[in-house]
Amino acid sequence: MTKIIDLSVKEKTYKSKKAQISILNDFRLEVAAGEKIAIVGESGAGKSSLLNIMGLLDRNYSGEYTLFGLPTEQLNTSQLAQWRNQRIGFVLQESALINSLTIEENIKLPFLYANSEKKSFKVVEDFDTVISAIEIRPILKKKPLECSGGEKARAVFARGIIMKPQIILADEPTASLDVENRERIITLLFNMNKEFNTTIITVTHDLEIANRHDRVIHLERGK
Amino acid sequence: MKIFKFIVSKIFLRKAILGIGIILLLLMANYITFTAARSILSTFQGYQETKYVNQEGVYIANLDPDSHIDMGMIEENGTQTVYDYLNSSFKYAFYTDGFIVSVPNGDDMEISLGYMNEQYYRLNGFELSQGTDLYFDYQLDREIPVLIGKGLSKTYPVGATIEMEESVLGRPLTLKVQGVLKQNAYHSNYYALNSKTYYNFSILFPVNEEFIDRASMDIQFNGLMDIILLDTSEEEIASLSEVIKDNLGLSFNFFSQKENYDYFSEYYLHSLKIIFITTFLLLIVITCLSVWNALVSVRLMLKDFTINLLVGLSYSKLKRIFYGYFGMLSFVNVALISIFTAFNRYGCWLRKDAAFAAYGLFGLIGMDWLALLLVVVSDIAIGIIVVESMLWKIKKVPISLGVLQ
């Protein structure tokens, strides 16, 4: 299997007002294409920091990160933004929507930053496919504040997969959902993996969900 | 452009604090800068124009504020005696204006008449756009050479004659257009240098001794109020004061070059300094408020920015959007001020106000354009401070998934 993530963090620190706090220490992770990985750990263990680094949002750490065979240090900020747009999808909690936009505008947001060739194809083809699969057509014209938690979670999910990313980084995607909606989101996530060989990396507190992944990584004190 | 339009319309303008707050603050900063800049420029123009009185041996007459005028007590013989004395003993520059008459013209404006003698004409150095220099050795019963403003030149080109009933001499006169003044030629008030009257719809009469002899007492008296004495001394001034006192019963002050200089530097330069410092302090306060407003806005919009950055927006693009947005606001504000100013200037034309009607590109004269340029410069400075503060704030709270939790 092709290795798409090769991450080695010597140290990631966070500077608080009083002291320098170490979040990740000598952490190493290799992920193959199509793998499903769950990251579990206590609050403050460094799970979100790890996702920030893997999602190319944070470069402020010592270590090396090779993504899709390319050292990310070589990428400038525009290229990082392009990769976040086209190759990485973020599936977050249901609150991660812009309230002033409709659900449709929220889902289509990644198209705005895509290059024109890909955009025209995706707007027409993928949008319809995704909203049909996720069953959110009735709420497209609604604003997030007019939707239920489950509907919003599905909208966030739709936005995360609309560009058919090679990696999906899911940060507690089911944290505040009821059992039915939680199951729906996890099924959609795993369907992406099955259908498009998408690599799934999920941060969760839910061990039942974590155990349904190929691998579970326990993060403790940044290791 | 599509991204810019999206972020501005769907995010920035949806947050009233950024949408309205920054527009109002910037409009306030622009208006203050524009008004102060125009005031300073206008005062500077006035100072440049009246520089000629800041010379050794030059004295400007000024009625003593404590002197009471009773026109009924002043006789024509009295003013004539004063002028006879002036003609025999002094070199003086005579100028008076503000006499309004109706003369047919293309713009249907009322016409302001100004009267000046040769000394004033030479001292002021009027610039002409057409025609030749004014001459003063004419005869009243023949054609009188005059200078006219640019606005009258369409109706009365050089060489044309103007027939009019003139109140100062109280008889019909035939005027011949000798020259046309440059567009927007003006005359500043000696005692309020930022105030000026434009000559675009004026007729300037050459005044010689014969003219003054035959003129009504009004013009003689008005001319005396601001008369400028040249190449003279304190002793000669003292004897003139006595002649005026004896014949008109009035006390006049004559300010010397030194007093004029002190007056200009102490009063006007001081005023300019106050305007400049006040404007500068207000701009600092407004800039601080704008930065505060921007930082609050960033806090309110951090989630929206984070989501956009997650799906492909880059910091460099965000920076360009911020600058573009600020530039757009600045453009709107500058346009508003330009329209407001042009409308004000156009109002002078609608009111047929000959003293203030001026020509300009899109209704704005050179001074307005210069002031607008300064507004743009101040906007650039404020823009850099505000945008860089916003970017600093965004980077200080690093965009991360934590922001969304």
Image: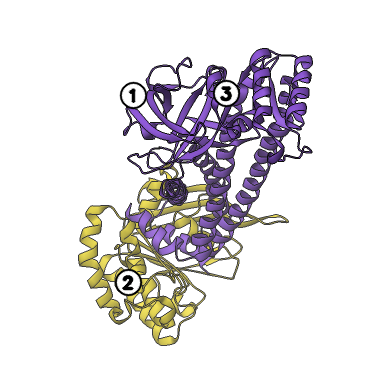
Residue B118 percent across, percent down from the top left:
53, 17
Frontmost of labels 2 and 3 is 3
Q: Distance between the residues labelled 1 and 3?
A: 28 Å
- Residue closer to the observer: B353 or B43: B353
Residue A23 percent across, percent down from the top left:
60, 58
Q: Which residue is drawn at 52% across and 44% down?
A: B379
- Residue closer to the observer: B308 or A199: B308
Name the colour assigned to chain A in the rendering.
yellow
Q: Residue at x 51, y 63 (%)?
A: B301
Q: Mark 2 points at which residue?
A: A104
Q: Is residue B393 above or below residue A205?
A: above
Residue B15 placement, left or right of A67: right
> In the rendered image, which quarter contains the N terminus of chain A?
bottom left
Q: Which amino acid does label 2 sit on?
A: Glu
Query: Are callouts 1 and 3 both on one chain?
Result: yes
Q: Name the residue under label 3.
A: B213
Residue B332 placement, left or right of A196: right
Residue B325 percent across, percent down from the top left:
44, 52
SS for dot 1? loop
Give me the chain letter of mark 1. Answer: B
